Image: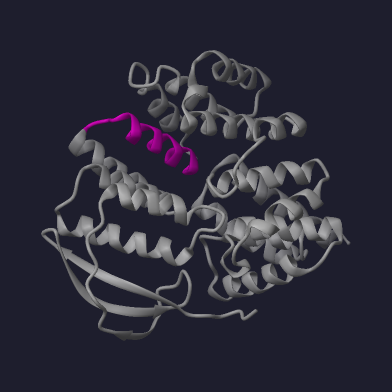
Amino acid sequence: MKIFFCTLVATFVVWAGETSAVRADIFYPDDRTVIASWEAGPEEKPELSSLKKSLDEARSLNGSGLALRRIIRLTNAIISSGNFEPEMLLFKARLQQHQHAFIDAASTIRQYTEKYGKTPSAQLLQATIAINLGKSDEAEAACRSLAGTGEPALSAICLLDIRSQQSPDLDDYKKLEQLHQYSGVATSATLDGWLREILASLALELNRPEEASAWLDNVDFNQVPLSRVALWADIQLALDQPDRVLNTLSPIINDPDNVDDAIMLRLAQAEKLSKNGTLWTEAMAQRVAMRAWRDDGVHAAQLARYYLDIQPDPLKALKYARLNWEHGKTRADKILLERAVDSQIESEEK
């Protein structure tokens, strides 16, 4: 496996709804360094529904980073044209959130609400972005604004989720359980999956890994978001079942080179714990070398975890935990930074 490889991506400009070809560029993955360029053919302007479907596919277990970068470029081009439907701004904010550009995402949400008002979709996204920026009051306010709009339980779920991310609480867990049982949320596959992920995450935080695992039973790992796959893997590792992680995920991964950092990290952790093979450990080492060479802030959390849990290096762990903290201010980000600080202190005391 090579540390560096090139990907072919196309860049387009959209003017008043018409797409004109600009060029095809070769980039390093997730990088903006163009090393070759030539004319490319035209591509149709995609509908928002098509972009949403493509994003869901790109952010799945066998999704493509190349596809994600193409979605980002097409979205920016469409918005730059001035000819787009309002929901496209929310989609752009979602993409910015995926790239950990939370400040930019918050700005995009403000642009949307100032022009089109506070819709349920906008407020849910705003709550998520605000908590990633460490703005808990703003996140809770966004959740409260959902009361009386759309799904009756939406505001309560949002609020309890935000609170549990700040301070996991058994009472909040019980309330979310009751909402899942009695609110009717379970009749919607999307809402049911979302609430089950919240409950599983909170159960794990409350040191109830068996319950956490039960919330994610019968998950189709090729269909759910990567966050749910990573959470499931964390739960299995907490249950001391690393072989289950390897035996479940490895066979359904189409291309090891294309695996998301968060999933590859957990597979490498499982290998280390089970002492069963080195495929993912070696792949993660190659990936980390590439990310570290570029001082990659987007993947800083995974780099910090790598240097804490797989190839211990307190100095590097602290470096990337601090870099990650510059991007995100959630409780998980804080815990990661504290782990890195403790690791560095322990190494100095030896």
Of 299 and 193, nearer the camera is: 193
Q: Quadrant of residue 219?
A: top right
Q: Nearer the viewer, residue 4 or 170?
A: 4
User: Residue 304 falls in which quadrant of the image?
Assistant: bottom right
Place of residue 331 in the rendered image (x, y in percent of width and height, measured from the top left): 60, 40
Q: Which residue reaches farthest left?
A: 16
Q: Residue at x 21, y 74 (%)?
A: 21
Left/right placement of residue 84 relative to residue 278 reads left
Task: Inspect this view and state whether residue 192 appears.
Answer: yes
Quarter where residue 258 is shown:
bottom right
Q: Which corner quadrant holds the N terminus? A: bottom right
Magenta highlight on residue 143: no
Q: Nearer the viewer, residue 252 or 17?
A: 252
Residue range in magenta is 117-133
Residue at figure coordinates x 56%, y 20% from the top left: 180
Q: Is residue 321 visible from the viewing direction of this image?
A: no
Residue 34's x, y, as percent? 38, 81
Relative horizontal placement of residue 58, taking residue 265 as reference (left or right): left
Q: Main secondary structure of the magenta part?
A: helix
